[in-house]
Each structure stands twice: as structure tokens, then as C-alpha cells.
Amino acid sequence: MRTLLTLAAGLLAAPSAAETPVPSPGELVAKASASDWTAIAPADLLVMDLSPDAKGADRRVVIQLMPAPFAQDWIGNIRKLAAAKWWDGLAVNRVQDNYVAQWGDPDGEDKAKAKSLPPGLTKPSADGYYHLRVKSYRAPRQPRAKIDPYAEAYGYDGGFPSASDATGTWPVHCYGMVGVGRDMPPDTGSGAELYTVIGHAPRHLDRNIALVGRVIEGIEHLSSLPRGTGPLGFYATAEERTAIRSIRIGSDVSGLAAYQYLSPASASFKAYAEARANRRDAFFVTPAGGADICNLPVPVRRVP
């Protein structure tokens, strides 16, 4: 099986000045045909509006929720929390440098002050719930690379980066992925406390914390926030926090843009992945010879 990182020998050499310039990964994505793009349903988006920045500009973060069968208990809870407007008025309460930005109830650890959760939330099972076991494993249609220190193979499932071994498959902690905050095991988290990766991919968290989606737009509104002054990047005072104006499912947001992702099964994605693994456009001198799964993010675009 040819993997994403196996390139034809002729493509590894940098072009001479007389040769036709080699397109960059971005140029290859821009040339992808309309049929190579997959629409993201508004009902599969979670839209978070933060309080305006210091200049009064709006700050919107758009998250694509994980497709079935991944993390559906948590995602069901997230839909209920958004419908109940539970996050409105809460805050981003933790920003740890090169790690995560986390949001939810700042008083969640204090039972006397914690905001009550809406009724009907599911308590996800602690029995192998962080990844799909072999008996329920759905093999991805895309090629899978065989070089990964954290797994036997990796590829894409429903447009999301994933890894696998003999036990099954699981989504991975790349930049912008969104996970569920939890306490010590056997606690599994409800989905009320969420975080996104804003630093180097913490792959050691794979299979230890449930991933529920990825930020597809507005990650800069979280990654650029001031770092927390308390332990683990938690804000020590309420004044340091960034307030959440609202969090809604995309189908409930008026005027929301339409989004598409480049299908990892497409020839365009294959060319894009090869180009990222071996940059041969004008700026680069030496092709890298490979890329890990988190260095091959799935392109997302707005649709006019």
C-alpha cells in the first residue's frame, strides 16, 4: 500500500531555475476541483462568540464536531448544553502556554458555586471509551502512513486525523483539536468543560481524553489570549478571564458562513500532502522527506 509519505523519486529533487516552478501546498489546495471538497453541515458546527477584543472587534470560534462513531456520548451532551445556552456568560478560564486554552464554568470545582448542568446529560462509559475497539473499528478509506511513534499507523477518518493499532483507532491531539476536560479516572467528563490545543501536538493525551472536534476558524482568538498566571495556566482572578457571550450549534446561528473541507480521499489532498512532506517551492532548499499526521492538517474553506 502506498502511504501519504511515500513519494516518487523524481519529486524529491528541487527544481532548477530553468524548470517550471513547483506549486506550494496552498496553491495545490486552491486548484482543487469542486468535487474534491466536502460540505460540513451547519448542525455539525459549534459556534462560540467571545466578548469583543480590546478594539471592540468580534471574536468568533467555529468548531467542527467529530463524526460518528467517535465521541457521540459527549457530543450529544454538547448539543444539549448549547441548546440550553449553558455556556452563555461563562469564560475561558485557562490558557497554558504551548498546551491548551480551556473554557467552561470557572467555579465548576466548587459545588456551592458551580452552575447547574441541564437535565438529560449522558455519563459516558469509562470502559474503553477513548477509542474505538477492533470490534467496532471502521477502517478509513484514505491511505494510512506507517511511521508514527504513538501508533502503528495513521490516516484520516471523516476528515479528522486518526491513528490506529491492533486494538482499534482513535482521533489524535493535533493543533486546534477540541477535547473534553475531566477529573481523575474514572471520571470521564460531561462535555461542559472543553479545551483546544494551542501548542505542539500533545499526542500523549491520545486515548486518555475524549476528543470531540476541531477548530476550523478563529483559533487565533484563543491562541493569542494572555497566559494564565496560576498553576497549569488557570487565571488567578476573574478579571483575567475572557467572557463567553454565547455557544450555539451552527444550525441555530443566523447568517453563519458555509464551510467545506478537502477530502483526504481526493487526488488533490494526496498532492497537497506530498507537497507538505517535501516542500519544493521556491523558498525551500532541502525537502524534509516526510511529515507527521499533525503536519498534514485537512484544509477547510468558506464557501461564498
Image: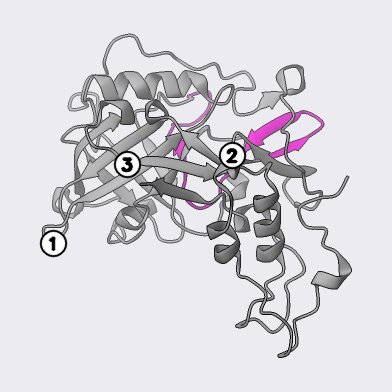
Task: Give the numbered dot on residue 229.
Answer: none
Mark in the foreground, 2 or 1: 2
> Can residue 245 be seen in the rendering of this structure?
yes
User: Could you tell me if the residues under marks 2 and 1 are in contact, i.e. CB atoms within 8 Å?
Assistant: no
- Residues shaded magenta: 163-187
Question: From what the image shows, is residue 241 above or below residue 125?
Answer: below
User: Could you tell me if the residues under marks 3 and 1 are in contact, i.e. CB atoms within 8 Å?
Assistant: no
Is residue 30 or residue 97 the one in the foreground?
Answer: 30
Q: Which residue is mark 3?
A: 257
Q: Which residue is mark 1?
A: 54
Residue 146 place in picture, x, y as percent: 81, 49
Q: Name which residue lies at 65% across and 44% down.
A: 264
Is residue 246 or residue 106 the one in the foreground?
Answer: 246
Q: Name which residue lies at 39% across and 47% down.
A: 302
Question: Of helix, strand and loop, which one carries label 2?
Answer: loop
Callout 3 crowding tier (Cα within 10 Å): few <14, some 14–19, many ≥20: few
Residue 168 place in picture, x, y as percent: 74, 28
Residue 95 place in picture, x, y as percent: 34, 53
Q: Earlier in the sequence, mark 2 or mark 3?
A: 2
Question: From what the image shows, is residue 11 above or below residue 132?
Answer: below
Left or right side of 229 for 210 = right
Callout 1 crowding tier (Cα within 10 Å): few <14, some 14–19, many ≥20: few
The kind of residue on which mark 3 rests is Ala
The kind of residue on which mark 2 rests is Gly
Left or right side of 114 for 124 = right
Task: Give the numbered dot on residue 159.
Answer: 2
